[in-house]
Image: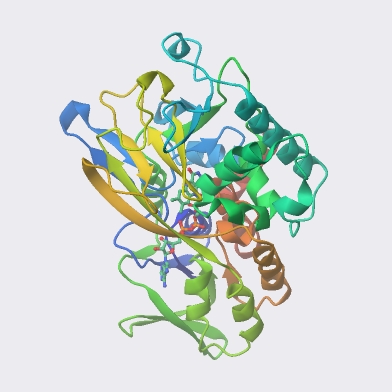
Amino acid sequence: MRIGVAGAGTAGLVTAWLLDPCHEILLLEKRGDLGGNARTVRVGAGDRAQYVDLGVHEVSDQFALWARLVRSVGLGQDSLLSVPASRTLRHTDGARPYLVGPHTPEADRGREVILGPAWDALGCLGREASRWEEEGLGEEVTVAQASDWTTLNAEMKHDVVHALPASVFGCGIHDVAHLAARGVGGFFAAAQPSAQEAASMHSLRGGTQELARALAGQLNTAEVRLRAPLHRLESHSDRFAMVEADGRRHLVDAVVLAVPPYAATAALQSLAGCTRLRSALDAFTYQELVYAAHLDPFGMPENRRHWSTTNVTVHDGWSETTLWYGPGHDADVFVSQITHRGTPRRQVARAAFRAPLPTPAAHWARRRLTEHSKEGLYFAGAYTRTLDSQEDAVASAVDVASDLAPESPRLAQLTTLCQEA
Ligand SMILES: Cc1cc2nc3c(=O)[nH]c(=O)nc-3n(C[C@H](O)[C@H](O)[C@H](O)COP(=O)(O)OP(=O)(O)OC[C@H]3O[C@@H](n4cnc5c(N)ncnc54)[C@H](O)[C@@H]3O)c2cc1C
């Protein structure tokens, strides 16, 4: 079969990689680069150059599929960095943070760890998130409906339980109560805080785009077209025509839409029998996000003894992060969300994103996409599953490949390895 894949983010690339040994693949990508929300920039020159991520930057050590994928594409153990997931929380106007979580025992000899009520509230969020998962809480239940947080005062509920997820999704702090609890909790359930040492996250030494490039490097026969946005899909007897923005047409037997929902709905505009699919895709809502990499300590606490890997500043109803690439790096490099605050003085790179929010309506939409599926048309992407994560992006590609190429040796490699884990 000839299969067209639109979108070269993690989901599209993994789909193409899984199908490549069994089918003829055409991959269309709108941008001039691979990776989608994985955007790595090189900061500095020569031996002192560092790779920093403006978008996807870390994965949980619970992401089994992702870890197996990294191994399968030949990125060895030395490609992975283990990063302590320490957190500082502070108000923009407060000199002293109200939370400085532990980092590593060695680093903490020079740091001032501040626990107290905010630490207890973080523990409460982790426990509730684990309970939502263990009890299989319905994916349409909101954060406000899932827990009453009676053990916390209003300040801790706002500044921790709502501010931390808001910093992950980029939405307003008050919007978190209306997000789906499972879509939020997945980011906090695995990270039960220990007062001695932060949980460890993984990142790729060469940045997360390294995985995208490794996947593309292993495509044998696939044709990859960059700066080639899919404009629309048309029916062509029992095949599909993928029409690019410049009018170029490609005939394929099946299509995998691994683009964000707003791009999928646009592509389906003139395809008959897709009204219900389009209304499902239209139910997603988005958050615009802007990130900058910089060399000045914009967004960091004044006192270096309060610096963590993730530093969250609560301000004006928003909470925004600054990631610190250190210690362990040659020079201090930072990546900040700057959607609702000023600009760093020594900015070296910048990128904008549009991310779907985990709302109850998104859950409804996912169910409709499955119920109204159309023969030969597939959807892949983190948004088709509960968590907007690397793991769910890979899992969505595995789902599609299980249908289109159950015999794929790469699929067997990923899923068998996963069962062994
Ligand atoms: C700022 C940010 C930070 C994140 N950080 C993390 C993190 O640290 N860890 C984590 O696990 N997850 C993180 N995520 C979640 C991230 O979205 C997923 O991990 C994953 O990268 C999603 O992959 P995807 O392929 O589903 O979508 P995308 O990465 O959005 O890929 C979709 C692709 O489709 C392309 N496209 C769009 N329109 C068209 C068109 N018309 N034709 C052709 N191509 C088109 C886009 O250019 C893009 O390449 C982050 C998300 C954002 C926005």
Q: Is residue 63 visible?
A: no
Question: Residue 171 placed where, x, y %?
Answer: 52, 55
Q: Nearer the viewer, residue 117 or 103?
A: 117
Question: Residue 95 at what x, y percent from top left?
Answer: 41, 28
The quarter of the picture where residue 418 lies is: top right
Q: Residue drawn 52% across and 59% down?
A: 19
- Colouring mode (rainbow / by chain / secondary structure / one colour): rainbow
Residue that appears at 59% across and 51% down:
392
Taking the image as drawn, is residue 162 in sight? yes
Quick one: quadrant of the C terminus? top right
The residue drawn where x is 40% and y is 36% is: 323
In the image, what residue occupies the spot 44% across and 57% down?
9
Name, please, the residue furthest toward the right: 135
**Figure quadrant of residue 187:** top right
In this rendering, the count of numbered labels is: 0
The answer to whether 132 is drawn above or below residue 351 in the figure is above
* Left or right of 404 in this view: 130: right
Residues 218 and 336: in front is 336
Q: Position of residue 142 (x, y in %)?
A: 72, 55
Where 326 falls versus 39 (above or below)?
above
As drawn, 2 above or below 402: below
Q: Is residue 241 above or below residue 163?
A: below
93 or 132: which is nearer to us? 93
Res 51 → quadrant: top left
Please state the horizontal and vertical placement of residue 417, each as a whole percent of the image: 63, 38
